[in-house]
Amino acid sequence: MVVGSVRSFSFLRFVTFPSVVLAGTPRILAVAILALGLAAAPLASRDAKADPAFNIVWMSAAGLLAAGIVGDLLRGNEISADTMPDEVDTLTFGMGAYNVWKDNEGDFDQMPALFRFEYRPAYYLWIAHPIAGIEATHLGSTYVYGGFMADVRFGEHIILSPSAAVGWYNQGGARDLGGPLEFRTGIEAAYRFEDGLRVGMAFHHISNAELGDINPGIEEVTLNVSLPIQYFLGK
């Protein structure tokens, strides 16, 4: 009986493994894309003056994605997106500060007010979904961007979300980041309400991959409120 049980278990694993792999192909693809983004991310901040801030973001994002992968495999710790309610499209409004991490460059020591508007469609590939938005300071700088965010869930309400984006920067009266093409990485910690409303704090780092003349980098902190789009559609 013992030998037969062992053989049955081994045969079951052999038969089900291909179907599990095929069923998980979208997730494997998503993991591969996110892993590639994380692997390439340090290049965007190479020699940036605010590397310590970027390293915090990058290492935290890698840890959170690892937690998401482990949770998705274990299925019992409620980190997996499969155990959570269906999401809805949201419009995110953010307000905070620009240039919160001081460096020794001396080229820009102000801390302007920062405003952000972001669209987050509820199209998920594993735990990742696209984002697109614009942010601006009261000094006239703007940054238009698009990218991806990954929602790593701890229970039904707490969500930690690393993100990566690429965008076009206009300096205005703010800091010279070395050129218009800039890359943004960040993490948001948010509380999700039952209807999909989220309230949270976000920290972002923006820098280039030495594509411009200089690469000083910039850090931002914002309070974000993500409103389900049905709030505006009357549904």
Image (tube, grey):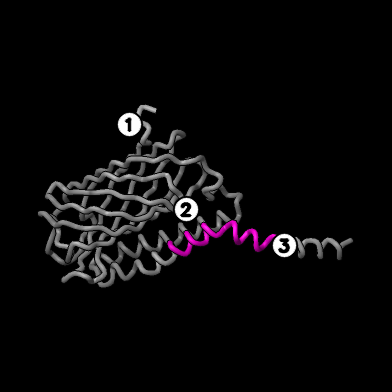
Task: Provide the residue designation for mark 2.
Answer: 125
Quarter location, residue 218? bottom left
Q: Kindly check if marks 1 and 2 are in contact, taking CB atoms under 8 A apart as contact.
A: no
Magenta span: predominant SS is helix
**The label number, if any, that marks residue 15 in the structure image:** 3
Task: Provide the residue designation for mark 1.
Answer: 232
Circle 3 residues within 10 Å: few <14, some 14–19, many ≥20? few
Q: Is residue 124 above or below residue 36?
A: above
In the image, what residue occupies the spot 38% across and 32% down? 230
Between marks 1 and 3, how big is the CA–CA gap?
49 Å
Compared across the picture, whether 168 is left or right of 87 comes to left
Q: Quadrant of the N terminus?
A: bottom right
Residue 25 is situated, as x and y percent measured from the top left of the image, at: 55, 60
Q: Is residue 231 above or below residue 178?
A: above
Residue 5 is situated, as x and y percent measured from the top left of the image, at: 83, 61
Total marks drawn?
Answer: 3
| Sequence-earlier tag: 2 or 3 | 3
- Of residues 186 and 169, the one drawn nearer to the viewer in this rendering: 169
Q: Is residue 60 above or below residue 44?
A: above
Would residue 18 be counted in the magenta stretch? yes
Would residue 29 be counted in the magenta stretch? yes
The disc labelled 1 sits on which kind of residue? Phe
| Sequence-earlier tag: 1 or 3 | 3
The disc labelled 2 sits on which kind of residue? Leu
Q: Kindly check if marks 1 and 3 are in contact, taking CB atoms under 8 A apart as contact.
A: no
Q: Read off the magenta span.
A: 13-34
In the image, what residue occupies the spot 32% across and 59% down? 185
Residue 75 is situated, as x and y percent measured from the top left of the image, at: 60, 51
Between marks 1 and 2, how big is the CA–CA gap?
26 Å
In the image, what residue occupies the spot 25% across and 43% down? 95
